[in-house]
Image (tube, coloured by chain):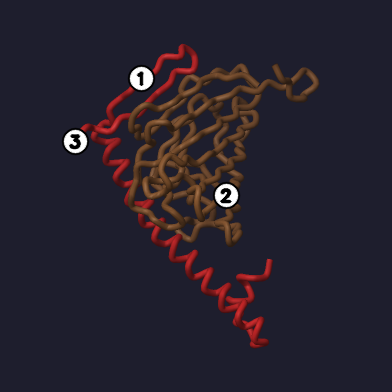
């Protein structure tokens, strides 16, 4: 696994994009530590949905989400969406209760990850995504997502944003590339 | 108020560019926020409704009372 890029924000930022992603690897892996500037939601400590899109595309995303709120666990298609298809405007959504907002305990960030196998192939792109949000007190939310981007183009850019607020200073994103060995197994370097 | 910005990192060169959002992007962001807010309210209501059904189902189970179809559906995996 090799670091391609690491970002640490030093100011409020509406969105972050990794562009011109090289096609040299087999899979991509992204680790994120995030907090939102939004103050609207106070549900379970306050959250902001985590949004993303590939290659700037606003179509072709579907998702099945398994999430836990600390007291309950659910697998759901959101009642505001048609089946699993996101209708959030031009961004797809992952981790609806995902990112801590300004109402959460200070300096507590949510963690998330994306694993994108065969990102440069001509097949549809599946993604396994996870995220955890807690407020260092009473709440802990966990999300597991099986995502699909029904597009045969190689992924060359990945963008992240929030539904309501902006990423605050201290938010980080790290993009890793993973290369399969000659026998198809994963190599570690 | 400062215009919101986005960060673009070119993975082929390492170049980092901070770009102010265009008017169109700001309109898009506002539409996203409106949609996210509507979704948030609906999702939180759905969560509250689901929890109410679970609480009712649990109480009825303890009391030996029959459950409604909705109460049974929310607790049966």
Q: In the figure, is residue A177 to the left or right of A93?
A: right
Disc 3 and disc 2 on one polypeptide chain: no
Q: How many circles with numbers are drawn on the protein?
A: 3
Q: CA distance from mark 1 to mark 2?
A: 33 Å
Q: Are dots 1 and 2 in contact, CB under 8 Å?
A: no
| Colour used to depict chain A in the structure image | brown
Neighbor class of circle 3 (other Cα within 10 Å; few <14, some 14-19, many 20+) is few
Front in this rendered view, residue B28 or B75: B75
| Quadrant of the rendering where the N terminus of chain B is positioned | top left
The colour applied to the residues of chain B in this rendering is red
Mark 1 — residue? B17
Secondary structure of residue under mark 3: loop
Of helix, strand and loop, which one carries label 1? strand
| Residue A142: mark in rendering | 2
* Residue neighbourhood size for the residue with mark 2, other residues' Cα within 10 Å, grouped as few (<14), some (14–19), many (≥20): many
Which sits in the foreground, B12 or A142? A142
Tell me, yes or no, whether dots 1 and 3 are on the same chain.
yes
Instruction: For marks 1 and 2, give the one nearer the viewer.
Output: 2
B32 relative position to A114: left or right: left
Q: Dot 1 falls on which chain?
A: B
From the image, tell me which residue sits under label 3.
Answer: B1
Relative image position of residue A61 (x, y in whole percent): 52, 43
């Amino acid at each position: 696994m090799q670091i391609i890029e690491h970002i640490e924000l030093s100011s409020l930022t509406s969105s972050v994009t990794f562009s011109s992603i090289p096609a040299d690897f087999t899979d991509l892996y992204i680790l994120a530590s995030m907090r939102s500037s939004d103050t609207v939601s106070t549900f379970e400590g306050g959250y902001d949905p985590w949004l993303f899109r590939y290659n700037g595309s606003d179509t072709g995303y579907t998702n099945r989400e398994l999430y836990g709120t600390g007291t309950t666990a659910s697998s759901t298609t959101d009642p505001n969406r048609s089946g699993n298809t996101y209708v959030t405007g031009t961004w797809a959504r992952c981790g609806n209760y995902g990112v801590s907002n300004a109402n959460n305990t200070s300096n507590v960030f949510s963690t998330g990850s994306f694993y994108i196998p065969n990102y440069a192939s001509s097949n549809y792109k599946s993604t396994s995504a996870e995220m955890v949000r807690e407020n260092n007190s009473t709440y802990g939310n966990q999300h597991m997502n099986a995502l699909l981007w029904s597009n045969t183009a190689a992924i060359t850019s990945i963008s992240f944003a929030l539904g309501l607020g902006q990423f605050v200073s201290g938010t980080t994103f790290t993009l890793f590339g993973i290369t399969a060995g000659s026998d198809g197994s994963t190599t570690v370097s | 108020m400062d215009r919101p910005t986005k960060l673009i990192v070119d993975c082929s060169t390492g170049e980092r560019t901070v770009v102010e959002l265009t008017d169109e992007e700001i309109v898009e962001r506002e539409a996203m926020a409106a949609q996210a807010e509507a979704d948030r309210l609906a999702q939180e209501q759905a969560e509250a409704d689901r929890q109410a059904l679970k609480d009712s189902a649990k109480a009825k189970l303890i009391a030996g009372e029959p459950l409604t179809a909705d109460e049974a559906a929310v607790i049966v995996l």
